[in-house]
């Protein structure tokens, strides 16, 4: 199973944020909806954000 970070609102429009374990993104959405919350965002833990550019590995130079 994968870890997902979520943000969701309840029926009183209070924001909830946390992590949930689910087999896939759809499972995470279902688990959040079962709490009577509406998902605002769900991202897989460790997933890179849009626009992230990995830095090249630097070479250590010794003299």
Image (cartoon, rainbow, N blue to C red):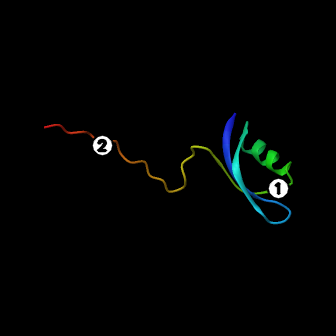
Q: Residue at x 20, y 39 (%)?
A: 61
Helix, strand or loop at mark 2: loop
Q: In the figure, 12 relative to 25: above or below?
A: below
Q: Describe residue 31's horizontal placement relative to residue 43 as left or right.
A: right
Quadrant position of the C terminus in the picture: top left
* Residue 21 point in image, percent of width and height: 72, 39
Residue under label 2, please give it: 58
- Residue 45 in which image quadrant: top right
**Camera-side residue: 54 or 13?**
13
Mark 2 near mark 1, Cβ–Cβ under 8 Å? Answer: no
Q: Is residue 19 left or right of residue 27?
A: left
Q: Which mark is residue 29?
A: none
* Residue drawn at the location 17% of the way across and 37% of the way down: 62
Q: Position of residue 18 (x, y in %)?
A: 69, 50
Residue 22, horizontal then vertical, whole percent: 74, 38
Q: Quadrant of the N terminus?
A: top right
- Left/right placement of residue 40 relative to residue 46 reads right
Residue depth check, mark 2 versus mark 1: number of the one nearer the observer: 1
Asked which secondary structure carries label 1, the reply is: loop
Out of 35 and 22, give the one closest to the viewer.
Answer: 35
Residue extending farthest top: 1
Report the residue marked by disc 1: 37
What whole-number distance in Å separates the C-alpha atoms at marks 2 and 1? Answer: 45 Å
Q: Earlier in the sequence, mark 2 or mark 1?
A: 1
Single out the residue that lies furthest toward the left: 63
Seen from the viewer's position, the closer of residues 53 and 21 is 21
Task: Looking at this view, name the residue that lies furthest to the bottom.
Answer: 13
Classify 36 as above or below 11.
Answer: above
* 44 lies left or right of 59: right
- Callout 1 crowding tier (Cα within 10 Å): few <14, some 14–19, many ≥20: many
């Amino acid at each position: 199973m994968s870890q997902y970070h979520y943000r969701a609102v309840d029926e009183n429009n209070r924001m909830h944020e946390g992590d949930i374990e689910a087999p896939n993104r759809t499972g995470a959405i279902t688990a959040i909806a079962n709490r009577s919350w509406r998902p605002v965002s769900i991202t897989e833990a460790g997933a890179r954000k849009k626009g992230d550019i990995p830095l090249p590995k630097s070479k250590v130079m010794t003299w």
